Amino acid sequence: MTTPIRPTTIADLESLVGEEIGPTSWHTLIQDDINSFADLTNDHQWIHVDEERAAAGPFGGTIGHGLFTLSLGPGFMEELMAFDGFAHSLNYGYGKVRFPQPRPVGSNVRMRATVSAVDARGTGSAQVTTTQIFEAEGIEKPICVAESIGYFTEHEADI
C-alpha cells in the first residue's frame, strides 16, 4: 500500500500540479459487488447481472457498471492523499468523465491521479481539479478517466 501524500496548505497542493501520484493497490471486481451496486442504483441491465446471458454477449461475461468504477475514486484518493490537515476538503463534483473500456468481472483495477489545476478562491481556499485514471490489469486502455473537483480550505474562517 502506498503511503499517502499529506498536503496541508493550498501552496502544497499547487506544488503537486502536473505530478502523477500512485498507483493505488489493486481492487478485484467480483460479481457479488456488481450485484450489490445494481441493487443500490436499481441498474440491473443484463450485461452487469445476468451471468449466463452475458457469457454469450460481446464481452464473454458480465462487466462492472462504469459508475461503480467511478465510485471507487474517493476511497482510492484517500489511499493516495490524506487531506486531514485542511479545515475542509469537500467533493464539488466532476468535470469530464469517460469509460473508454469495459471492466470485466474478475478484473483488478487501480487508480493513478494527477493534480491538474489549483484555482484560488480567496485566501486559504482553492478549487482543485484532479485527473483520475482507472486502469485494469491486462487491459491497454483506461477503464475510466475522470476530472474530480474538490474544494479545500485551510481554516474554518475561509469557508
Image (cartoon, helix red, strand yellow):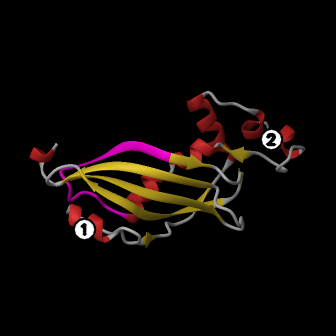
**Rendered image quadrant of residue 116:** bottom left
Residue 38: give x, y in percent of width and height: 63, 34
Q: Given contact means CB atoms under 8 Å apart, are the residues at marks 2 and 1 in contact?
A: no
Q: Residue at x 41, y 70 (%)?
A: 18
Q: Residue at x 72, y 47 (%)?
A: 63
To which residue does mark 1 refer? 12
The furthest residue to the right: 56
* Disc 2 crowd, CA 10 A, few/some/many (<14, 14-19, 20+): some
Q: What whole-number distance in Å separates the C-alpha atoms at marks 2 and 1?
A: 47 Å
Query: How many numbered discs sit on the rendered protein?
Result: 2
Report the front residue among 89 and 12.
12
The furthest residue to the left: 157
**Rendered image quadrant of residue 1:** bottom left
Report the front residue among 78 and 14.
14
Span colored in magenta: 81-95
Q: Secondary structure at mark 1?
A: helix
Q: Earlier in the sequence, mark 2 or mark 1?
A: 1
Residue 51: give x, y in percent of width and height: 80, 41
Asked whether, in this view, residue 117 is left or right of residue 45, the answer is left
To which residue does mark 2 refer? 51
Number of the front mark, 2 or 1: 1
Q: Secondary structure at mark 2?
A: helix
The residue type indicated by label 1 comes to Asp
Which circle marks residue 156 in the picture? none
